[in-house]
Amino acid sequence: MMNSLPVLPTISTTFIVLSAITVGIGWVQIKQRKIEAHKKTMITAAIFALIFFIIYATRTIFLGNTSFGGPNNVKVYYTIFLIFHITLATVGAVLGIVNLVTGFKKKFSIHRKLGPITSVVWFCTGITGVAVYLLLYVFYKGGETTSVIKAILGF
């Protein structure tokens, strides 16, 4: 019998994948000079990313983060990979916000230069995010989950 997947991590991971897919669609649209479609698609990508972040942050604060439940000899590699993913996600989020702002403010010289870099970082964030999800919940059984509130306040 197959173990069921955790609902909130599955939903949040789905939203980050949708965000990466819509960024890809938006990239194709701007290459085709479909400016209005590009704008709408990239706003949709940002909304998907925001939904991911709200679910992730709420879950982290109230339910907690799940520790790696795989073998100890894999844990160090998972941890290094997780740090890489978190760094990518942080850089990607900042670049995404800067790109949205430069697009809305019509600062297109910066927007055009930063867009492809941001997109590649975001694709890598999506791919590594899916890999983290698979390592935590599919390939290995997740470890202990402790909420930030419990970890900080002790209850």
Image: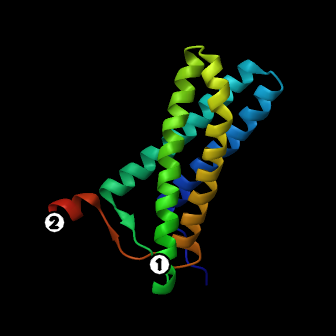
Judge whether 71 appears above or below 51 on screen.
Answer: below
Binning the other alpha carbons within 10 Å of mark 2 as few (below 14), some (14 to 19) or many (20 upward) gives few
Q: Amino acid at mark 1?
A: Lys
Quarter of the rendering containing residue 32: top right
In the rendered view, does 67 fall on the left or right side of 37? left
Quarter of the rendering containing residue 45: top right
Q: Earlier in the sequence, mark 1 or mark 2?
A: 1
Q: Which mark is residue 75?
A: 1
Q: Residue furthest right?
A: 32
Q: What residue appears at the point 73 percent right and 23 percent down from the top-left corner?
A: 37
Binning the other alpha carbons within 10 Å of mark 1 as few (below 14), some (14 to 19) or many (20 upward) gives some
Q: What residue appears at the point 55 percent right and 35 percent down from the top-left corner?
A: 96
Q: Secondary structure at mark 1?
A: helix
Q: Where's residue 30, x and y in %?
A: 76, 26
- The quadrant of the image that shows the C terminus is bottom left
Identify the residue position indicated by label 2 in the image. Answer: 154
Q: Amino acid at mark 2?
A: Gly
Q: Are marks 1 and 2 in contact (CB under 8 Å)?
A: no
The answer, for residue 6, to whether it is visible in the render is: no
In the rendered view, does 31 fall on the left or right side of 97? right
Q: What residue appears at the point 61 percent right and 80 percent down from the top-left corner?
A: 2
The answer, for residue 87, to whether it is visible in the render is: yes
In front of the other: 92 or 38: 92
- The quadrant of the image that shows the N terminus is bottom right
Q: Secondary structure at mark 2?
A: loop
Q: Where's residue 14, x and y in %?
A: 60, 53
Q: What residue appears at the point 31 percent right and 54 percent down from the top-left corner?
A: 61
Quarter of the rendering containing residue 63: bottom left
Q: Which mark is residue 48?
A: none
Judge whether 8 appears above or below 98 on screen.
Answer: below
